[in-house]
Image (cartoon, rainbow, N blue to C red):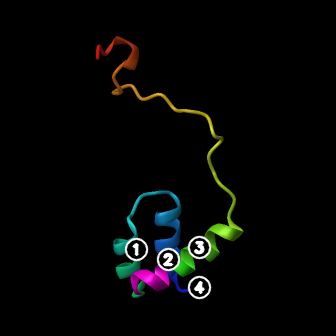
Amino acid sequence: MRPETRQSMEMLFHAKWNLPKAAKNANLTDKEMKITFNEYCAFHPPTYDGSVAESVDAPDLKSVEN
């Protein structure tokens, strides 16, 4: 895999870039990037543990009145 394609895959996988930006970096069309990224995901397991992360800046939803 070319270095720019690998970079695009890793940035997409970690949700740092959107698909059009990654495709442009890798010199691929959006459709080619979707196909390539789908293959990439098939061979790379998720890196998150599935727990819900709490953000310091997130409002306390229980205190919000409807």
Query: What is the distance, in whole Å, between disc 2 and disc 1 at their CAs?
Result: 10 Å
Q: Are marks 2 and 3 in contact (CB under 8 Å)?
A: yes
| Residue 55 figure quarter | top left
Of 4 and 16, the residue lying toward us: 16
Q: Secondary structure at mark 2?
A: helix
Real-space CA distance between mark 4 and mark 2, rounded to the nearest whole angstrom: 15 Å
Q: Is label 3 in a helix, a strand or a loop?
A: helix
Kind of residue at disc 1: Ala
Residue denoted by label 3: 38
Provide the residue span drawn in magenta.
Answer: 29-34
Q: Nearer the viewer, mark 4 or mark 3?
A: 3
Which residue is located at x 39 percent, y 63 percent? Answer: 17
* Mark before the other along the chain sequence, 3 or 1: 1
Q: Label 1 vs label 4: CA separation? A: 14 Å
- Residue at the spot of label 2: 34
Query: For residue 42, which quarter of the picture?
Result: bottom right
- Answer yes or no: do the residues labelled 2 and 1 have beta carbons within 8 Å? no
C-alpha separation, residue under disc 2 versus residue under disc 3: 6 Å
Residue at coordinates 46% horizontally, 73% vertically from top-left? 8
Pointers 4 and 3 in contact (C-beta within 8 Å): no
Query: What secondary structure prevails in the magenta region?
Result: helix
Side of 65 relative to 5 (left or right):
left
Q: Nearer the viewer, residue 42 or 24?
A: 42
